[in-house]
């Protein structure tokens, strides 16, 4: 028996997938993909990621603050992240660092990344990182 494959990083909450998630999941299943790790990138999409996971069992939720959105995060984003993760069983991510021109400053990104690393360690949760 061949084990199902896992898509380790996707963004089904992206507006481009609105109304198409069942079709995407059916194509994934036909290709042997049994689970899809859906990574939240900012507070505004965390609830959608959790909704997708609730409505579609193959979707595994991750909630995090991507470095592109580190400056736009609310003052207690980490507390809200903790609450949602504890309530849902989601992992942490997408997080990381991106020092390309036009991105938030190094100190802001590093603080957000370190906070998420500490949270994942404290709660013994998986972490999804952006890689460039």
Image (tube, rainbow, N blue to C red):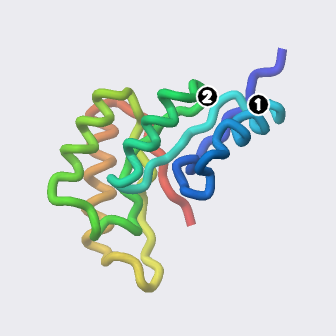
The image quadrant where one finds the C terminus is bottom right
**How many circles with numbers are drawn on the protein?**
2
Vertical position of residue 58 compared to residue 105: above or below: above
Q: Secondary structure at mark 2?
A: loop
Vertical position of residue 95 compared to residue 57: above or below: below
In the image, farthest residue toward the bottom: 101
Q: Position of residue 1 (x, y in %)?
A: 84, 14
Q: Position of residue 31 (x, y in %)?
A: 83, 35
Q: Position of residue 49 (x, y in %)?
A: 46, 41
Of residues 60 and 67, the one nearer the viewer is 60
In the image, farthest residue toward the top: 1
**Residue 59, quarter of picture:** top right
Whether residue 88 sits left or right of residue 51 in the image: it is left
Say which residue label 2 marks. 58
Looking at the image, tell me whether mark 2 or mark 1 is earlier in sequence order.
1
Of residues 30 and 121, the one nearer the viewer is 30
Residue found at x 31% / y 37%: 121
Vertical position of residue 11 compared to residue 105: above or below: above
Residue contact between numbered discs 2 and 1, judged by CB atoms under 8 Å? yes
Cα–Cα gap, marks 2 and 1: 9 Å
Q: Secondary structure at mark 1?
A: helix
Residue found at x 16% / y 52%: 76
Q: Neighbour class for label 1 at 10 Å: few (<14), some, many (≥20)?
A: some
Whether residue 56 sits left or right of residue 43 in the image: it is right
In the image, farthest residue toward the left: 75
Say which residue label 1 marks. 29
Q: Which mark is residue 79?
A: none
Q: Position of residue 11 (x, y in %)?
A: 56, 50
Q: Neighbour class for label 2 at 10 Å: few (<14), some, many (≥20)?
A: some
């Amino acid at each position: 028996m061949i084990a199902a494959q896992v898509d380790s990083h996707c963004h089904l909450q992206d507006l481009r997938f609105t109304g198409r998630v069942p079709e995407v999941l059916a194509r994934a299943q036909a290709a042997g993909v049994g689970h899809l790790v859906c990574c939240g990138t900012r507070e505004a999409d965390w609830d959608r990621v959790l909704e997708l996971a609730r409505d579609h069992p193959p979707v595994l939720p991750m909630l995090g603050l991507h470095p592109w959105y580190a400056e736009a995060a609310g003052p207690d984003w980490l507390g809200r992240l903790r609450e949602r993760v504890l309530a849902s069983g989601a992992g942490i991510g997408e997080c990381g660092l991106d020092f390309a021109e036009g991105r938030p400053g190094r100190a802001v990104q590093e603080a957000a990344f370190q906070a998420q690393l500490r949270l994942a360690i404290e709660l013994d949760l998986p972490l999804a990182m952006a890689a460039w």
